[in-house]
Image: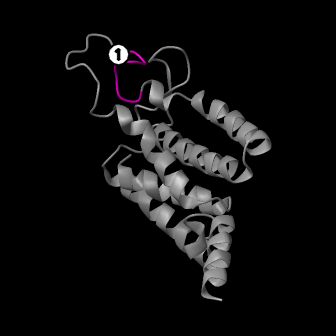
């Protein structure tokens, strides 16, 4: 899937769960950090560490991030934990969307085998169907109130900003 599709997916999933959008968007883009940078030009055998959709797309990253976000929420900062959970949702949405493609994502300790539903090819007509589905879900979320201007940074942060702004003006 392309970056725009991953961003849409992150927004849909995070707003449905009433999480801040910004960390989710960042999380949805991070797995593709392996796309152009740091990969060897010549590859004989694909591994988790030298190919796109390798280690950064591994399914076991999600449980690790979930445990980390719960720990941060419980022992460090509730707001930071919420942001990390939102980041995790964005990351998971990226992996979910990539699992719909023929290449899929790794789930064992090697590049192959991979989890793939083989429903859509990246950049083809199938991805347009995914985008339209996500846009329809986005419109529904706006209509029912899951998604609004406060969703970008999170309702708690926006409430604090409004309170500080109110105190400064009065």
Q: Horizontal and vertical percent for residue 95?
A: 51, 39
Residues in magenta, as a range? 46-53
Image quarter hosting the C terminus: bottom right
Q: Residue at x 59, y 56 (%)?
A: 13
Q: Which residue is mark 1?
A: 46
Q: Considering depth in this image, is 76 or 37 the residue closer to the camera?
A: 76
Task: Indicate left or right for 119 with 162 as reference.
Answer: left
- Queried whether the magenta region covers residue 49, the answer comes back as yes
What residue occupies the far bottom of the structure in this picture? 170
Residue 92, horizontal then vertical, whole percent: 57, 42
Question: Where does the image place residue 14, in percent across and percent down from the top left?
Answer: 60, 57
Q: Residue furthest right?
A: 74
**Regarding mark 1 in the picture, which secondary structure is present there?**
loop
Tell me where residue 149 sits by quadrant.
bottom right
Query: Which of 50/104 is in front?
Result: 50
Q: Residue furthest left?
A: 41
Residue placed at 57% from the left, 64% from the top? 153
* Left or right, residue 138 beside residue 170: left
Residue at left 51%, top 58%?
A: 22
Label 1: few (<14), some or many (≥20) within 10 Å? few
């Amino acid at each position: 899937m392309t970056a725009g599709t991953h961003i849409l997916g992150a927004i849909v999933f995070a707003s449905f769960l009433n999480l801040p959008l910004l960390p989710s968007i960042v999380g949805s883009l991070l797995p593709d950090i392996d796309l152009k940078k740091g990969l060897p030009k010549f590859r004989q055998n694909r591994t988790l560490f030298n190919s796109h959709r390798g280690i950064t797309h591994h399914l076991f990253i999600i449980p690790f991030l979930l445990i980390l976000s719960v720990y941060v929420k419980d022992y460090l900062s509730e707001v930071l934990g919420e942001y990390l959970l939102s980041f995790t949702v964005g990351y998971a949405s990226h992996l979910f969307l990539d699992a719909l493609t023929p290449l899929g994502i790794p789930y064992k300790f090697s590049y192959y085998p991979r989890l793939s539903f083989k429903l859509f090819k990246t950049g083809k007509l199938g991805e347009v169907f995914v985008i339209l589905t996500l846009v329809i879900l986005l419109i529904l979320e706006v209509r029912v109130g899951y998604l609004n201007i406060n969703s970008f940074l999170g309702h708690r942060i926006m409430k604090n900003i409004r309170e500080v702004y109110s105190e400064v003006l009065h």
